[in-house]
Structures are given as C-alpha cells and as structure tokens.
Amino acid sequence: MKRALLLLATALTTSAALAADHVPLPLVVGHLATRDGKVYEGATIIGEDEVGVKVQHDGGTARVLYSKLPDDLAKKFAVSAAEGKTQQEENEKKQKEAAEAQREREKEVKPQGGYIPNPPAPPAAAPVLDAETQAKIAALQAYLAKLKKGVQESTAASQKATKRAQELRARAEINVVDATGHTVASGTNGSVLAKAEFQENQAAKEQAKIAEAQGLIAQTEAKIVQLKNTPPAPPALKPKAN
C-alpha cells in the first residue's frame, strides 16, 4: 500500500513538473542545426504540436520533429515530445480498436466459411433481338455518335468565340494617361466593340446547338434502351391449308 501511494505521488509530482516546463514562445534560436544536417539561420521557434516545432527563419518557415532537434533544444521541449508520444499512442490504440470493431461487423455480415445467406438472384438475361430491331439500334447508335461529335465541335467553337470576344472587349476600352500614369480620358472603340458582340452572338448560337443536341441525345439513348429491352414479336401463324 505504501509503495502504491509512493508511486502515485511520484506520478503526480512528475506530471505537475512536466506541465510547468513548457517553453514560452516565441523562442529566438538564431543558428539552428538539426540532427539530420539541416541548418536554419535567423531561426525563431514560433509554435509546437505533438510531433515537433514550427520554425521561422531567414528562408521562410519549416517543421522540425522533436527527434531532429539538437540536444539543448530537445531537453527544453522534452515535455512536448513526451506528450506527443502519448497522444500518438492513444491515436494508434483508437485506430486499432476501430479496425477490430470493423472486423467484428464483417464477421456478422459474412459468416465463417464464406457462406452468405439469401444470395442475390442473377440478373435476367437480355432478350434476343430480331434483325429488324438490331438494325434500328445500329442506326440510332450512329445518329447518337454524330450528335455527340457535334456537341464536342460546338463546345470548342463556343469557347473559341468567347475567348475572342473577351480579347476584343479589352481592346475596345481606350484610356489616355498622362506622364504621371493617371487616366485623363477614356472611351470605347465602336468597331472593335461590334466585333466583340458578334463573337458573343456566335458563342450563344453554339451554346443553343449544344442544348438542343443534348436533348436529342437523351431521347436517342432512351429509345435504344427501350429497343434493347423489347422482346421479339412471336412469329405469325401460317394459315392451315384446306
């Protein structure tokens, strides 16, 4: 009992000492040479977390792990390093517990031996299509490919016209500046502006073509699906000879 109380008192004393030993930041270091050979000049430690410190130096900022700090700084940040290790162990423990729980859930869904009760029914076989239906589908697929190609071409044309219109509108704006760089007069070149508006109208026409083609594509795809799922008509019965 005395030994247990002694251990508890020691742990509480150590925890209190560690909590009080955090290094006040920012900490000016100046020349910082890490254990892996990196050197930072004009270094100042401006932050810390569970894995290391954040260093601001002449070349920018850097992250340095506690294990890479030189001995003098490693001793100062021993508290943070110890807390980071504890946090990492707790995270690993939680991940391990979550993985174990996931495995248990999988066992419930899939019993041992690989047997799955009530397996799903196999998909129904597609109907065998007659020659006439196959010909209709082939024609619709060719039409569908033509529509999609048209959408690609109209998209490219619309993008080109839009870009050209933007360039022309920028050129249409006229600004007169004095020697100090201040604008003293401004105006618009009507001829260039008209060209920009023409390109914008062209882009709008291409967008209209795209919208119309997309509607036809949806209708054609639906028709193809309908034909593929339509069972062939039964053969006509021949009249009996008298």
Image (tube, rainbow, N blue to C red):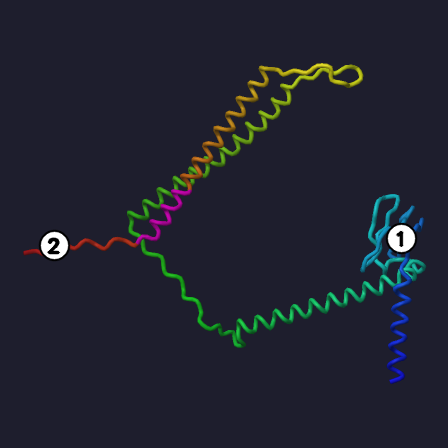
Report the amino acid beneath label 1.
Leu
Residue at image x 52%, y 28%? 203
Identify the image quadrant of residue 100: bottom right
* Residue matched to label 1: 25
Nearest the viewer among 202 and 182 is 182
Q: How far across and down, in percent of the image, does residue 15 sit?
A: 87, 69
Report the amino acid beneath label 2.
Pro
Res 144 label: none
Q: How far across and down, in percent of the image, does residue 130 sit?
A: 29, 51
* Residue matched to label 2: 239
Q: How far across and down, in percent of the image, does residue 187 sit?
A: 65, 15
Residue at image x 49%, y 33%? 153
Q: Look at the image and tell me in which quarter the C terminus lies.
A: bottom left
| In this view, the mark in front (1 or 2) | 1
Q: Earlier in the sequence, mark 1 or mark 2?
A: 1
Q: Is residue 222 magenta?
A: yes
In the visual, does 7 lie left or right of 239? right
